[in-house]
């Protein structure tokens, strides 16, 4: 067999095995309510912050799945949201998104939304596009929506974003991230590979800013993933990137102190000569801790000082084929009847076992020692336990339908995801340390 073909078959098989991370990487609600700091006087220069606790649940409240898709539900909020400077407050949004479990790579690429959601953080907060929903309309950045020259979001409003998730709420209360979700990767040392911090709507993972220096070598050094985008060398805005000419009706303003380079998304272009680690979609094919056989993955981009760097999450276009309903404003996504799901529900009565997808774990919560029972289990099973950031922290093989799991060395007050693979079936439960 051709050696290249053999390698591709092997990598595809590995991806099939490890695609379960799209189930285990979500930060599930454990009974917490969303909370946030609100700038009550609305002034970005003289803010007054007041802390509020919402009546809406935080993080991801339900994950459903079949062999083709994963659905997530969340209110778009998390706990202790940071101190954003703009006025307003986050509110529950009732999101349902769908992700393909077997991503496809089309020849014709889809433009990632400039306005609205392009992906979802693991805590259920949406990733928004590269524009602040304003464009140049011939007399200023007064157009609302998407135009030819679209205001670049970080230059326009990066100063009002919070430092925890690079996020803020818009006028209708939809809290969302534009850049640098610091909280989701900051507890992982920059000397190791960053965790999964979200998923793009084409089904590929988004990692924090650090990865292997050699894409397919997990033993190579850890390095910051550098973008291949840079500002164009232009003084007038009479063409779009990559040599696309415009008619005079679509010209933008000349480069000036009022409209400096970087004012618009279209002021940037990706060049191989920049020597970045990432392609024009802001990702690459590589091995990761969750995908040792290789996967395409996006990465958060920051500069050497930690400042967010264009395009922040996803490039101008998706690498894979995104779910159309996810990027269509106003589209309704429903979970098919009978789909397997796990939720935020926890049984805090230690005398009763917690049942989730036919898994019995008890006591739960516990001090780290859990009894496990799968009534329908037969033969040998592989048991794995993952942290909420998707890191595998425990594994073992067992025979029979009862065993014990000891993760007491993982600290206290933690939430973990248990996965059991048996005869082609997967069982999932939440473990809670007290």
Image (cartoon, helix red, strand yellow):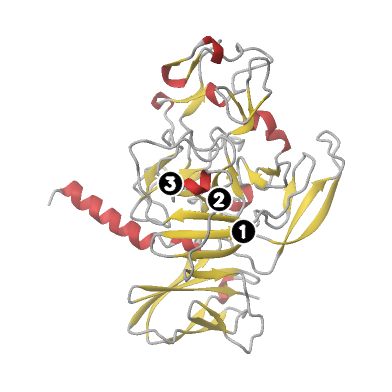
Element under disc 1: strand
Kindly identify which residue carries mark 3.
297
- Asked if the residue under mark 3 is in contact with the one under mark 1, i.e. CB atoms within 8 Å, the reply is no
- Asked if the residue under mark 2 is in contact with the one under mark 1, i.e. CB atoms within 8 Å, the reply is yes
User: As drawn, is 94 to the left or to the right of 320?
Assistant: right
Q: Does residue 335 lie above or below 278 as drawn? A: below
Residue 208 visible, this angle:
no
Question: Which of the 4 quarters of the picture holds residue 281?
Answer: top left
User: As drawn, is 303 to the left or to the right of 108?
Assistant: right
Q: Earlier in the sequence, mark 1 or mark 2?
A: 1
- Residue drawn at point x = 33 percent, y = 77 percent: 423
Kindly identify which residue carries mark 2.
120
Q: Earlier in the sequence, mark 2 or mark 3?
A: 2
Kindly identify which residue carries mark 1.
74
Q: Earlier in the sequence, mark 1 or mark 3?
A: 1
Element under disc 3: strand
Disc 1 crowd rating (10 Å Cα; few below 14, some 14-19, many 20+) is: many
Task: Give the total of numbered labels.
Answer: 3
Q: Quadrant of the C terminus?
A: bottom right
How far, Cα to Cα, is label 1 from label 2? 10 Å
Give the image location of residue 50, x and y in percent: 85, 50
Furthest residue in direction bottom, as rendered:
351
Give the image location of residue 209, x and y in percent: 52, 43
How far, Cα to Cα, is label 1 from label 3? 23 Å
Res 129 label: none
């Amino acid at each position: 067999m051709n050696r290249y073909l053999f390698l591709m078959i092997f990598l595809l098989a590995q991806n099939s095995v490890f695609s379960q991370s799209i189930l285990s990487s979500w930060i599930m609600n454990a009974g917490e309510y969303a909370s946030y700091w609100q700038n009550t006087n609305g002034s970005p220069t003289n803010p007054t912050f007041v802390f509020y606790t919402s009546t809406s649940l935080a993080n991801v409240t339900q994950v459903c799945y079949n062999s083709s898709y994963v659905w997530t539900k969340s209110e778009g909020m998390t706990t202790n949201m940071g101190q954003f400077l703009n006025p307003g407050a986050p509110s529950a949004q009732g999101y349902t998104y769908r992700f393909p479990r077997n991503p496809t790579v089309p020849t014709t690429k889809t433009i990632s939304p400039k306005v609205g959601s392009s992906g979802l953080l693991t805590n259920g907060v949406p990733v928004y596009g590269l524009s602040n929903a304003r464009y140049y309309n011939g007399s200023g950045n007064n157009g609302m929506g998407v135009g030819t020259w679209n205001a670049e979001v970080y230059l326009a409003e990066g100063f009002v974003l919070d430092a925890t998730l690079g996020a803020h709420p818009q006028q209708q209360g939809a809290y969302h991230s534009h850049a640098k979700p610091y909280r989701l990767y900051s507890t992982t040392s920059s000397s190791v590979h960053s965790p999964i911090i979200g998923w793009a709507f084409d089904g590929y993972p988004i990692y924090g800013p650090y990865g292997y220096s050699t894409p397919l070598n997990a033993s190579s050094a850890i390095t910051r993933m550098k973008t291949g985008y840079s500002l164009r060398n232009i003084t007038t805005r009479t063409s779009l990137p990559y040599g696309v000419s415009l008619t005079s009706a679509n010209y933008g303003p000349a480069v000036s102190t009022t409209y400096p380079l970087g004012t618009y998304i279209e002021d940037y272009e990706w060049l191989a000569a920049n020597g970045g680690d990432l392609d024009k979609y802001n990702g690459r094919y590589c091995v990761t801790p969750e995908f040792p056989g290789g996967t395409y993955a996006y990465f958060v981009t920051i500069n050497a000082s930690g400042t967010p760097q264009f395009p922040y999450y996803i490039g101008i276009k998706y690498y894979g084929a995104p779910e159309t309903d996810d990027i269509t404003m106003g589209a309704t996504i429903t979970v098919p009847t009978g789909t397997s799901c796990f939720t935020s529900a926890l049984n805090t009565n230690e005398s009763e076992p917690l049942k989730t997808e036919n898994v019995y774990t008890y006591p739960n919560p516990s001090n780290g020692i859990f009894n496990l029972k799968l009534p329908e289990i037969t033969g040998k099973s592989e048991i794995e336990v993952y942290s909420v950031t998707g890191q595998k922290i425990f594994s073992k093989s067992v025979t029979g339908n009862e065993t014990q799991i000891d993760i007491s060395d993982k600290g206290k007050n933690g939430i973990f995801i248990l996965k059991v693979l048996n005869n082609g079936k997967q069982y999932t439960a939440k473990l809670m340390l007290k």
